[in-house]
Amino acid sequence: MPRYSEERKAAILKKLLPPHNRSVASVATEEGISNATLYSWLKQCREKGVPVPGHTEGDNEWPPDAKLAVVIETATMSETELGAYCREKGLYPEQIQQWKAACLQGAGQQEEQAKAAQKQ
């Protein structure tokens, strides 16, 4: 089994991830790498919290860091762009709104805890 340098792996993954979102089959054919290897790399990305297109997870299956990444990534998008993004990721705009609200709520709770700790 061949080993790929981190630079080559990153370049190939770049083709599979946004904004390119190319299919595994086309990249595998172009690069001469097996589909299984590319799916393994995408799985590793997903485990690191990188939003991976074509992988439809339930709301509870997204790790918190991936949810935050999606909230940040979509913060400046128009409604049309957000709709396209959600279709690519298998999400609903309402989910992203809920995730954003949870992030803000968590930040607010952290501030309250810091103030309470200061008072003590």
Image (cartoon, grey):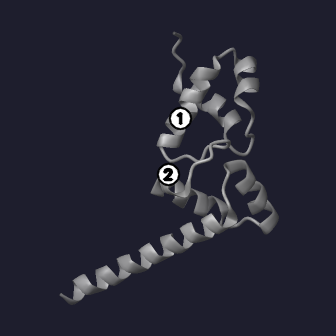
**Does residue 88 appear anywhere in the picture?**
yes
Q: Position of residue 11 (x, y in %)?
A: 64, 30
- The answer to whether mark 2 and mark 1 are in CB contact below 8 A is no
Q: Where residue 17 sits in the image (x, y, percent)?
A: 66, 40
Residue 66 rendering spot, x and y as whole percentages: 52, 53
Q: Residue furthest bottom?
A: 119
Label 2 secondary element: helix
Instruction: Say which of 85 and 11 sits in front.
Output: 85
> Under tag 1, what secondary structure?
helix
What residue sits right under mark 1 in the picture? 43
Is residue 8 something one can see in this rendering? Answer: no
Q: Residues within 10 Å of mark 1 (few under 14, many from 20)?
A: some
> Toward which corner of the image does residue 34 lie, by quadrant?
top right
Find disc 2 in the rendering and name its residue.
Answer: 61
Q: Is residue 78 left or right of residue 39?
A: right
Q: Is residue 61 above or below residue 24?
A: below
Query: Which residue does the image show at 75% across and 19% down from the upper left?
Result: 30
Work out which residue is located at the far left of the displayed protein and give it.
120
Which residue, as the protein is rendered here, is positioned at the far top? 1
Q: Which mark is residue 62?
A: none
Up the image or down, 81 lies above or below 32; here it is below
The residue under the point 68% across, 65% down is 93
Left or right, 62 with reference to 81: left
Q: Amino acid at mark 2?
A: Glu
Query: Residue flagged by tag 1: what amino acid is it?
Result: Lys
Q: Position of residue 114 (x, y in %)?
A: 30, 80
